[in-house]
Amino acid sequence: MLFLRPLLRRGNHRVCLRQLRALSTATDPTPNQTNPQKHPTSNRVRLVEVGPRDGLQNEKKTIPLTTKIELIEKLAKTGLLDIEAGSFVAPKWVPQMADSNEILEYLLKYPPTSLNPISYSFLAPNAKGLENTLNILRAHPNAYSTFSSQPTSPYEPDESSPLPNGPASDPTTHKPLVELSVFAAATESFTRKNLNCSIEESLERFKAVIQGGKAHGLRVRAYISVVLGCPFEGYDVDPKKVAEIACDLMEMGADEISLGDTTGMGTAPRTGELLRAMQAAGILKEDIAMHFHDTYGQALVNTAISLEHGIRSFDSSVGGLGGCPYSPGATGNVSTEDMVYFMESLGMDTGVDLDAVVDIGEWITKEIGKPNSSSVGKAFLGKRQTQ
């Protein structure tokens, strides 16, 4: 895809954009490289833990920095490979994320003990957010790894290695991987409420972030929110428009698209329609992650539909924490506990220690004074009390 992108800027080439988009992918299809995510029949599933960022950002009461760091450190020991850690958004818009620079500095100085190297993601909504991130990384040049420096992708685990909740594997300290993310939206109304600009203008901003991050060897994840329903425009979100935005982001260099059902309005038929639109646009399954909220109790149903379409990456939040400051009425993300249990019931392999995640969900919800929204977590805790 990289060799095609320059053609988009050459007016003297009559190139069909749709044909270019049909090839859109940031995945390097290197031959003879084992990648379980490239095969829809693979039982390996990747969960991206969004609790420390997406799960906490909407909390009105200030959460101590020490609590946020402790949450990340606890999650790092469960077998998760991806953790959203913070956001370099203006504190006046999201005050809860005002200490994200301190979180990144702490992770670089004192990497959490983990079973495997972990990617810590930070939202950088604009050029200023990118520069803040890069300034911290420049101050600690040998404290982190980039994806380009890895001999193999962290998303290509060794199938023969023991799982974290298996009989072996002792936690140790690894250099953290650092990842950036940008946050687009599928409707004009939500984009203006969230970013104070149009979709087109937002994509222009993200281009600098994506390309700046890639220039420094960082992986960049692109979210598209309200893909299955908007709090301002309702259910009529055009799946073709979502696919068009996804293609634009990948042509800029994004490595992965996370499709967010921010309002939880998604249904099984519309989830399938969206994924068919993505496929028709040429977006590969391994370049897509699904991000479901459980507002209407449909998150696991939509997850099942996504699995049937070959998706193997999903976002989740410990304890079901979450919500969106710009999506009135939207409740939390699907819980990590529920996702792990659901995947295991289908014979899928997440590599995540369910008992440990249940304990963390109970701890963090009590710590911040919120009810535990995980059905599986509450069931496990209740069962323990009877034993």
Image (cartoon, rainbow, N blue to C red):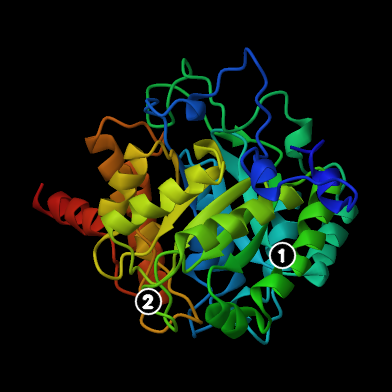
- Residue displayed at 65% across by 15% down: 31
Left of 69 or right of it: where is 347?
Answer: left
Q: Is residue 148 visible?
A: yes
| Pointer 1 with pointer 2, Cβ within 8 A | no
Q: In this rendering, is residue 377 above or below 280?
A: below
Residue 39, given in percent of the width and then of the height, sits at: 45, 25
Q: Quadrant of residue 152?
A: top right
Q: In this rendering, is residue 382 above or below 309?
A: below
Which three-letter amino acid code belongs to the residue tagged 2? Answer: Ala
User: Would you name the residue on which mark 1 appears?
Assistant: 124
Quadrant of the image containing the N terminus: top right
User: Would you name the residue on which mark 2 appears?
Assistant: 330
- Residue displayed at 46% across by 65% down: 238
- Marks 1 and 2, how far apart at CA: 23 Å
- Disc 1 is placed on an element classified as loop
Residue 347, given in percent of the width and then of the height, sits at: 27, 30
Q: Residues within 10 Å of mark 1 (few under 14, many from 20)?
A: many
Residue 92, given in percent of the width and then of the height, sits at: 67, 87
- Residue displayed at 29% across by 73% down: 371
Left of 137 or right of it: where is 220?
Answer: left
Earlier sequence position, callout 1 versus callout 2: 1
Q: Is residue 71 visible?
A: no
Q: Quadrant of residue 378?
A: bottom left
Residue farthest left in this picture = 386
* Front residue of 94 and 244: 244
Which three-letter amino acid code belongs to the residue tagged 1? Answer: Ala
Left of 220 or right of it: where is 155?
Answer: left
Residue 323, given in percent of the width and then of the height, sits at: 43, 73
Q: Which mark is residue 370?
A: none
- Disc 2 is placed on an element classified as loop
* Front residue of 318 and 205: 205
